[in-house]
Image (spheres, rainbow, N blue to C red):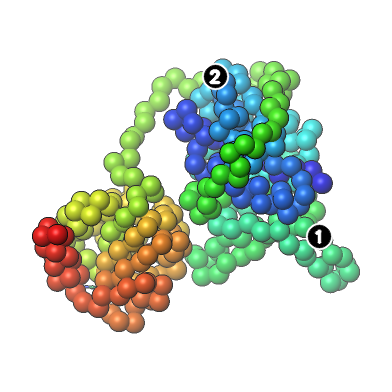
Amino acid sequence: MNSVFVICEIDDAKIADVSLELLTKGRSLANRLKCKLEAIVLGSELDGIEKELFPYGADVVHIGDDPRLKPYTTLPHAAVINGLFREEKPQIGLLGATTMGRDLGPRVSSALGSGLTADCTALEIGDHEEKKANMVYKDLLYQIRPAFGGNIVATIINPDHRPQMATVREGVMKKEIYSASHKGVVKKIDVSKYLKPEDLVVKVLERHMEKSRVNIKNSSIIVAGGYGMGSKENFNVLYELAELIGGEVGASRAAVDAGFADHDRQIGQTGVTVRPKLYIACGISGQIQHTAGMEESSMVIAINNDPMAPINRIADYVIVGDVMDVIPKMITYYKKN
Ligand code: FAD
């Protein structure tokens, strides 16, 4: 059985968290399929990068270290990965559902004629029976993702083409060290073998980085506000509470759409996925598109004036009341204690 491949991404000179999350999942898929887990890293000045990947279970790390691969541009990356995949014939190819993964994944999969499931939230191994053809496909990758606006969860399979490719949303899978002493093999990619002059037509002349002002993804406490907060001004109590308890402010899409908070605070299916230790949902109803982005929180406190609000079903504690009554009381309490 050929390997499970993870196409890794570099963020601030380190392997991006989403790639480590994919390696953690890839390790369990590879164990199940009894095959190797292999990582691909493309870029420049990558000395020692494999040391970040071996503890997450990579058996092989393919490194394409070449100035033509930095910064990321679509064509050279796609050319190298296509070339490598044609030779290595992976069973599974995984990428993060990031700007890079969403750009690169479809290029690679269409060039290989394999198809790709975007924005998966879970991956499993299973069989599929094709009753009409009297066929059983063994050990397929179940690519699981929300569909129809989050109203159903679809399981997508690709019985006929390889590799089975998927992009996976950031933060939905756990990043876990497999073994600190796990050692694999490094294979240097001969980049020139795959690059043609037409792959090098794009030059990045300048980069403007817009620094996100918030870091809700890595915050261990999130105070999230919904449409029930009523106004942008009322959100100020959330900022005050968050600051007192060392958290960040998140928001539902309805609150963002109403202009109560900026889009980079949106949590859910079309926002970020978070898994804080504490999530305080204030005036949020708990529609599936919102809970998809926060249901892995260790503890959820819901503050809502509707005792039947759906968020209450996943909350550990529910405070039934008006947000503008309850939250100022919490602020007073935390200021005193
Ligand atoms: P509402 O549903 O209006 O709920 C407001 C809540 O506040 C209610 O429960 C109400 O009882 C309570 N409330 C009202 N006043 C008070 C008060 N004074 N005190 C206490 N409680 C009060 N949503 C997201 O959040 N994130 C996403 O990423 C996302 N992606 C989507 C993608 C698609 C394709 C679609 C179709 C929808 C998406 N949505 C997303 C929207 C989602 O379906 C809901 O519309 C949205 O989450 C509702 O936000 P809300 O809970 O803040 O507002």
Report the front residue among 276 and 136.
276
Residue 183 is tagged as none
Q: Quadrant of ligand 1?
A: bottom left
Q: Residues within 10 Å of mark 1 (few under 14, many from 20)?
A: few
Residue assigned mark 2: 45
Q: Position of residue 227 (x, y in %)?
A: 27, 66
Which residue lies most toward the right here?
134
Quarter of the image that includes the C terminus: bottom left
Q: Is residue 1 left or right of residue 104?
A: right
**Distance of mark 2 from mark 1, alpha carbons?**
41 Å
Report the front residue among 309 and 161.
309
Q: Position of residue 281 (x, y in %)?
A: 31, 65
Query: Which residue is painted at 34% across and 45% down in the image?
Result: 215
Task: Answer whether residue 273 is visible to the viewer in this image.
Answer: yes
Q: Secondary structure at mark 1?
A: strand
Tag 2: residue type? Glu
Q: Position of residue 217 (x, y in %)?
A: 39, 49
Q: Earlier in the sequence, mark 2 or mark 1?
A: 2
Report the front residue among 77 and 202.
77
Q: Quadrant of residue 137?
A: bottom right
Tag 1: residue type? Lys
Query: Which residue is painted at 69% across and 33% down in the image?
Result: 184
> Vertical placement of 149 versus 321: above or below?
above
Q: Position of residue 243 (x, y in %)?
A: 20, 51
Task: Answer whether residue 80 is visible to the viewer in this image.
Answer: no
Residue assigned mark 1: 138
Q: Quadrant of residue 283?
A: bottom left
Report the front residue among 44 and 38.
38
Q: Secondary structure at mark 2?
A: loop
Query: Which residue is painted at 77% across and 46% down in the image?
Result: 35
